Image (cartoon, rainbow, N blue to C red):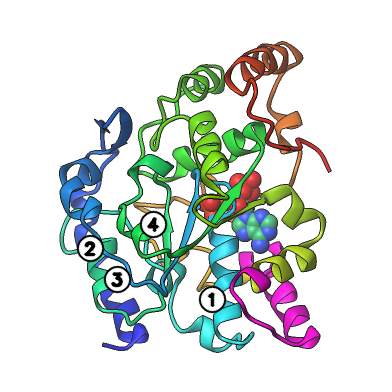
């Protein structure tokens, strides 16, 4: 099946399954809260065997996954923007662990139908990534975003994504985030888990803030990591095509493929603000102080150079 046909099947499948989609409860898998469908299918996810040429893009949710997926797809296609409009992001770059009610294809089913090298998205913390990735020495890019902006983005996303638990009020959400009670668990453990493994596993660890500050520099960094060498002109085209404004308008990147009953973009658009420092519009001074005090404890000794402003 071509990716275009796959796209149609995917969208129709989501429409068909809409009635059985709900805010799924979280079930812990080795202590990490995951959506029930993922937890129930855990054994098949853990057993996944990638090809050595496959690339893993790992993130805590809302750290810049879609942006990085788009950049990498363009790099793999020599900046061919038409080729990168062949299907929506989740079809071009499947979500490894996602399982939803039938007939929505799981990430594993989509991957099975694709030829390597595949661009595989995951939100799993390091210890839950199927060991086949490291045994096969797959390349992996980890994108990290500062905790405060990451949480703000997740809060809005949980409001619009009708398959995630209700975010509830902002004040309570901050505490859930600090305690790691959201889908995919603790932000703190997630960013630290990949950080400590980055050299041993040859993981390219990049920051959302750096991408915002100098997208060209970061696209080139990813290009070199992938052992690609594209012309300056192609790199410029990739930077332009993956700007926030262009991705927001691109139906193949802005998740408009997901029906409103699942992603209600009138509550909050998937491409919401795309900024560094939006947290200042959400945290009160007291909340910020309380968060920072806790952050210091949770991140003690980690030395990860996060920036909350650029
Ligand atoms: P905001 O909610 O802060 O706007 P993910 O893809 O991991 O779900 O992350 C989504 C976040 O990345 C959203 O953040 C979204 O707007 C932002 N984003 C997506 N594409 C972007 C781009 N091209 N440039 C900047 N930010 C982008």
Which element is circle 4 on? helix
**Residue occupying image coordinates x 79% and y 65%:** 217
Residue 259 in view, yes or no: no
Question: Do the CB atoms of the residues marked 4 and 2 lie less than 8 Å apart?
Answer: no
Residue 230: within the magenta? Answer: yes
**Element type at mark 3:** helix
| Residue placed most toward the observer, 251 or 148 | 148
Instruction: Read off the magenta span.
Output: 224-248
Pointer 4: what residue?
Answer: 134
Q: Alpha carbon of mark 3 to alpha carbon of mark 4: how far? A: 18 Å
Rendering coords of residue 63 (x, y %): 58, 47
Which numbered disc, 4 or 1, marks the residue closer to the eye? 4
| Mark 4 surroundings within 10 Å by alpha-carbon count, few (fewer than 14), some (14 through 19), many (20 or more) | some
Quarter residue 244 falls in? bottom right
Q: Main secondary structure of the magenta part?
A: helix
What residue is disc 2 on?
104
Q: Does the magenta segment cover residue 310?
A: no
Is 145 left or right of 210, judged from the image as shown? left
* Residue tagged 3: 111
What residue does disc 1 label? 73
């Amino acid at each position: 099946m071509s990716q275009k046909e796959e796209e149609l099947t995917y969208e129709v499948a989501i429409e068909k399954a809409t009635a059985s989609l709900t805010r799924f409860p979280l079930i812990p898998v080795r202590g990490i809260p995951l959506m029930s469908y993922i937890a129930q299918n855990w054994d098949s996810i853990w057993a996944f065997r990638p090809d050595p040429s496959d690339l893993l893009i790992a993130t805590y949710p809302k750290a810049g996954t879609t942006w990085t997926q788009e950049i990498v797809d363009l790099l793999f296609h020599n900046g061919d923007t038409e080729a990168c409009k062949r299907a929506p992001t989740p079809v071009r770059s499947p979500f490894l662990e996602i399982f939803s009610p039938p007939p929505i294809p799981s990430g594993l089913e989509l991957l099975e139908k694709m030829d390597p090298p595949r661009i595989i998205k995951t939100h799993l913390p390091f210890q839950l990534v199927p060991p086949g990735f490291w045994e096969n020495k797959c390349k992996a890019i980890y994108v990290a975003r500062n905790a405060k902006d990451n949480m703000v983005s997740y809060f809005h996303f949980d409001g619009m994504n009708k398959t995630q638990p209700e975010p509830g009020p902002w004040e309570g959400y901050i505490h859930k985030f600090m305690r790691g009670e959201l889908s995919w668990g603790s932000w703190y453990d997630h960013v630290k888990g990949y950080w400590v493994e980055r050299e041993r596993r040859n993981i390219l660890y990049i920051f959302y803030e750096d991408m915002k500050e100098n997208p060209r520099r970061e696209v080139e960094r990813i290009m070199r990591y992938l052992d690609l060498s594209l012309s300056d002109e192609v790199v410029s085209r990739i930077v332009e095509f993956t700007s926030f404004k262009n991705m927001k308008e691109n139906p193949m990147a802005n998740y408009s493929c997901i029906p409103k009953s699942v992603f209600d973009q009138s509550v909050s658009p998937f491409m919401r603000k795309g900024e560094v420092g939006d947290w200042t519009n959400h945290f009160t001074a007291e909340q910020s102080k309380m968060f920072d005090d806790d952050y210091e404890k949770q991140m003690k000794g980690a030395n990860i150079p996060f920036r909350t402003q650029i």
